[in-house]
Image (spheres, grey):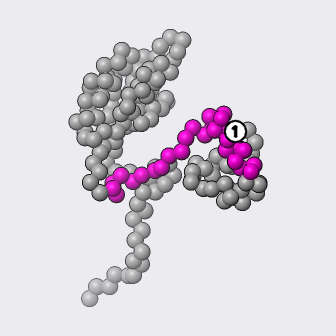
Amino acid sequence: MEQKEIELLKLLEKNGRMNNETLSKMLDVPPAEVEEMIQKLEEEHAILGYSTLVDWSSVYEYEGVAALIDVKVTPVRGLGFDKIASRIYRFPEVKAVYLMSGAYDLSVSVEGKTMMEVSRFVSDKLSTLDTVLSTTTHFILKKYKHDGIIFDDGDDDDKRIMVTP
């Protein structure tokens, strides 16, 4: 992969809505070349999709919960962790699955409407899989930063010094 392609991927990772003209100027290559690079990277599956990062806590009347679940599993001979990871990421509740180092093998990101819904997913679907040995569920109470984006830096515009009598 060429250096310009890596730079393009980094720019798109930060802002997938950046147009080809802007990318062209930032990379110092013609817009047609940017379009070709994007098409090539999509065909090679270096670019898997484009998404929007939403701060759901600021969306009025939206209620939902997210959890990170540590999962200890028994790897399958000849397939390692891939088979069980594949089984887990096919559940619609699962947003992400990572193979981890440390005490647990997999980290599973799950979203649901309520804590009970996530709990039922863990007790009825995840923990009943043959190779799952144990799980530990951590509910996300608040997101401060995700994918390099700070959700609320707490920096209000009022810079006046408070004066008390």
The residue at the point 69 percent across, 39 percent down is 40
Magenta-tinted stretch: 32-59
Residue type marked 1: Lys
Secondary element at image label 1: helix
| Foreground pick, 146 / 9 | 9
Q: Residue 121 placed where, x, y %?
A: 29, 29
Q: Can residue 129 be seen in this view?
A: yes
Q: In the image as oriented, which residue stretches furthest toward the top?
A: 77
Q: In the image as oriented, which residue stretches furthest toward the bottom?
A: 165
The reply, left or right, for residue 156 in relation to residue 50 is left
Q: Residue 57 placed where, x, y %?
A: 33, 54
Q: Can residue 81 be seen in this view?
A: no
The reply, left or right, for residue 21 in relation to residue 18 is right
The residue at the point 36 percent across, 36 percent down is 110
Residue beneath label 1, please?
40
Count of number-bearing discs: 1
Quadrant of the drawing holding the N terminus:
top right
- Whether 157 is drawn above or below 56: the answer is below
Q: In the image as oriented, which residue stretches furthest toward the left?
A: 116
Quadrant of the drawing holding the C terminus:
bottom left
- Whether 117 is drawn above or below 128: the answer is below
Category of crowding for the residue at label 1, using alpha-carbon neighbours closer than 10 angstroms: few (below 14), some (14–19), many (at least 20):
some
- Whether 110 is drawn above or below 26: the answer is above
| Foreground pick, 45 / 135 | 45
The residue at the point 54 percent across, 45 percent down is 50
Q: Residue 60 placed where, x, y %?
A: 29, 57
The residue at the point 25 percent across, 39 percent down is 115
Magenta span has 35? yes
The reply, left or right, for residue 39 in relation to residue 86 is right
Magenta span has 76? no
- Whether 62 is drawn above or below 83: the answer is below
